[in-house]
Amino acid sequence: MFKSCGGKEVYFFLNIQAKDAVKLNPQHNQALAELANYRLLVESIQDYAIFILDKGGHVRTWNKGAEKNKGYLANEIIGKHFSIFYLEDDVISRKPERELELAQKLGRVEDEGWRVRKDGSQFWASVVITALYNTSGTLVGYGKITRDLTERKSHEDELRKANYLLREQQKDLEELNLSKDEFISLASHQLRTPATVIKQYIGMLLEGFKGRVSGEQTEILQKAYDSNERQILIVNDLLRVAQVDAGKVIIHKVPMDIKSLLTDMVEGQRSAFGKRGQTVITKFDEPISDINLDPVHFRMALENILDNAIKYTPNHGKIMLSVSAAPKSSRVKISIEDTGVGLKQKDIPKLFTKFARISNSLSSKVGGSGLGLYWADKIIKLHGGTIEVDSKLNKGTNFNIWVPVS
Amino acid sequence: MRKILVVEDEDLLREAYLDVLSTEPYQIDTAADGKQALNKCRETKYDLILLDLMMPVVNGVEFLEYYIQEGLSPKRVLILSNLSSGKELNKAMELGAYKNLLKANISPKQLLSTVRYELEAA
């Protein structure tokens, strides 16, 4: 009954008190009683300002909610133009009139915005204006329902502000991270120069460019040279990690024969494990088709893992290298299995963290930057692969590197 | 006599390279930046140029650009820098420098054998 198409009737009946019902024709009694209930409902609602405007926008009815919401009593506001509820700027820009025009055109209009109370204070209002028509289709006025959403609005504003601050902080952190990466990169380049100079001069003596050097002198020079080499390795690792962390490593995949890549790699490391009297056994039984890999980065990642195996395997120990792929499998498994000191289960997850140094019987003797496996893991992931580690303390560690074929 | 130009801004390294390469009967000239290197190249035709990249005045990449503009071939230019990657190195390789070695990875003996090999291949 309280709907826009019966606007005139509603307007009329809302002005009838429930007690009037009995005086009228008994056949209307029930309808009138219902209407009186509607009136009671509308009048009693405190959370919503519900009122009717005439065609010109003047207030015609006023409920408790409107009183509470806007601060005017019914006798103060009825007959006044509803633009009184709007901010001055909105009045100048004819917002109230435009809203009515729009409601007439579209049937209804919704809006959220600042409105003004009697005392001049402002509140954030959610407004619905509905055009009201009588049965013959003539516009008779507008129904206006307003809710004070200031509290929700202030929560939203706070949230928005917090969100903005978070985003700013995030940006600052990203910038800081970037400048950290750049700093590491620059510092590492700078550190390479003096290390290179040391390498050349000690190298000249050690490699006999300046005549014969005694055994004892050679020993001392070799220590200095080796220490410098370690420094160069650390700087190289730092640079590599800074690059991968900054997302600057680009993987260029080409079809590769994995077996020859692994064979070459083992040959390249021969002096390292040969010096320790270790044996690297390769087991490439199955035929394996080419895999799409970045030959440079992938090989370096595997080298880091093999290097780790060499470091932690005792002298004269064995290291097994194998490749396998289940028929029609989309992945290939490369295993590097050492017979080294092994790891405690709880230490396995630490392996691929930056500067991870896991204490064991060899760790004090083994040098390194603690970045090699971290970098290798990142590179394997950039290939869409994963590394699984299986280890037994004092027995050895098995690195299974899974990579997709394509 | 084979002619080599060493372009390196770090005095101690330039001296070390000169010292090491002088053990062979080469004519070795040195330059401390790209500008000096260009002037040398205008006077002498080198069989091999060892080129650093990060240098003051005229850096390695700029040197290569001028060098090519003057109609000289980058085929004999070997990059010997401490850049293992990055824009500068990529640019130098795109310009046609034919090889790239990391200074920090080369011992005097390795430098000498690399130069010998490159000159024989030339």
Image (cartoon, coloured by chain):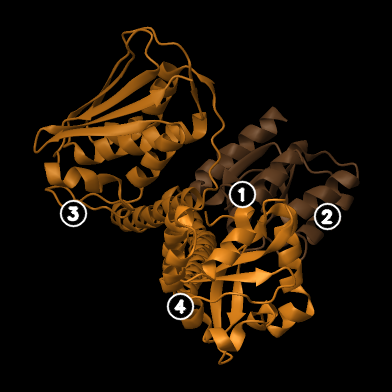
Chain colours: A orange, B brown
The image shows residue A344 at horizontal and vertical percentages of: 11, 43
Q: CA distance from mark 3 to mark 2?
A: 51 Å
Instruction: Single out the mark in the foreground, 4 or 3.
Output: 4
The amino acid at mark 2 is Leu
- Are the residues at dot 3 and dot 2 in contact (C-beta closer than 8 Å)? no
Please give the chain letter of the residue carrying mark 4. Answer: A
Instruction: Single out the mark in the foreground, 3 or 2.
Output: 3
Are labels 3 and 2 assigned to the same chain? no
Characterize the local packing of mark 2: few (<14), some (14-19) or many (20 or more) Cα atoms within 10 angstroms. Answer: some
The image shows residue A47 at horizontal and vertical percentages of: 43, 72
What residue sits 65% from the left and 47% below the top?
B89
Please give the chain letter of the residue carrying mark 1. Answer: B
Q: Which mark is residue A64?
A: 4
Q: Which mark is residue A364?
A: 3
Q: Secondary structure at mark 4?
A: helix
Q: Is residue A97 left or right of residue A216?
A: right
* Quarter of the image that includes the N terminus of chain B: top right
What residue sits 43% from the left and 19% below the top?
A258
Sooner in the amino-acid sequence: mark 4 or mark 3: 4
Q: CA distance from mark 4 to mark 2?
A: 91 Å
* Quarter of the image that includes the C terminus of chain B: top right
The amino acid at mark 4 is Lys
Characterize the local packing of mark 4: few (<14), some (14-19) or many (20 or more) Cα atoms within 10 angstroms. Answer: many
The amino acid at mark 3 is Ser
- Location of mark 1 (residue): B86
Sooner in the amino-acid sequence: mark 2 or mark 1: 2
- Location of mark 2 (residue): B38
